Amino acid sequence: NAGVTQTPKFQVLKTGQSMTLQCAQDMNHNSMYWYRQDPGMGLRLIYYSASEGTTDKGEVPNGYNVSRLNKREFSLRLESAAPSQTSVYFCASSEAGTGGFGYTFGSGTRLTVV
Amino acid sequence: SQELEQSPQSLIVQEGKNLTINCTSSKTLYGLYWYKQKYGEGLIFLMMLQKGGEEKSHEKITAKLDEKKQQSSLHITASQPSHAGIYLCGADGSGTYKYIFGTGTRLKVLA
């Protein structure tokens, strides 16, 4: 089925470890996004990529880096994981930058940092 | 910065009852989106509203955007257990890529 695929679905890290969350979409969307979801705080934008070759910071970028590898793939890297980064991470994509057609979300990655 | 406030935070209703979820913005909304999230899953796009006074329906779910474009409501008629989940409103109020979300409303429907 067409959509957004995120890997892994679950991950446990020790403080200080690094890891990369992968995201790929097969809808030929230009824009891609990374959000984190925490209880009581809703979804917060970490980074976004308006189009291939561009990335920009969102609301909560500290501690993260991103790479728009090509039009399909947008990865999120945690260089030195901290317990505050325990969260559910969602990747999304959209056809138009302002999301006029709605975003398509992946199923999420549940990350626990101990 | 723009914020979206949803109410109520959680809702438990008996199957067959109607319910309304509200989303209020601190600034004018250029586009208001409703999503549903099943527990442990990603978000599913429900509908988008752009014009003041606009109303859209999908099956038993109706969303409205007020004339001032600062408040939206989501109404579910004759709720069913399949309606259970988290409903989130989202907006691109500034017309940028920095799409924001409300904190969500958790809906439980008792059979």
Image (tube, rainbow, N blue to C red):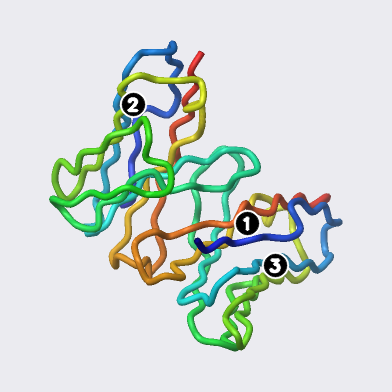
As measured in the structure, the alpha-carbon distance from the residue carrying label 3 to the one carrying label 2 is 35 Å
- Chain label for disc 2: A
Q: Earlier in the sequence, mark 3 or mark 1?
A: 3
* Figure check: B93 above or below A3: below
User: Image point 51% across, 13% down: which residue?
Assistant: A114
Residue A24 falls in image quadrant: top left
Q: How crowded is the residue under tag 1: few (<14 C-alpha within 10 Å), some, or many (20+)?
A: many
Look at discs 3 and 2 and give the one toward the viewer.
Answer: 2
Give residue A103's position: percent from left, percent from top: 40, 59
Look at discs 3 and 1 and give the one toward the viewer.
Answer: 3
Q: Which residue is mark 1?
A: B87
Q: Which residue is mark 3?
A: B22
User: Image point 49% across, 46% down: which residue?
Assistant: B42
- Chain label for disc 1: B
**Circle 3 SS class:** strand
As measured in the structure, the alpha-carbon distance from the residue carrying label 3 to the one carrying label 1 is 10 Å
Is label 3 on the same chain as label 1?
yes
User: Image point 63% across, 38% down: which residue?
Assistant: A39
Is label 3 on the same chain as label 2?
no
Kindly check if marks 3 and 2 are in contact, taking CB atoms under 8 A apart as contact. no
Mark carried by residue A78? 2
As measured in the structure, the alpha-carbon distance from the residue carrying label 2 to the one carrying label 1 is 29 Å
Of A46 and B62, which appears nearest the observer? A46
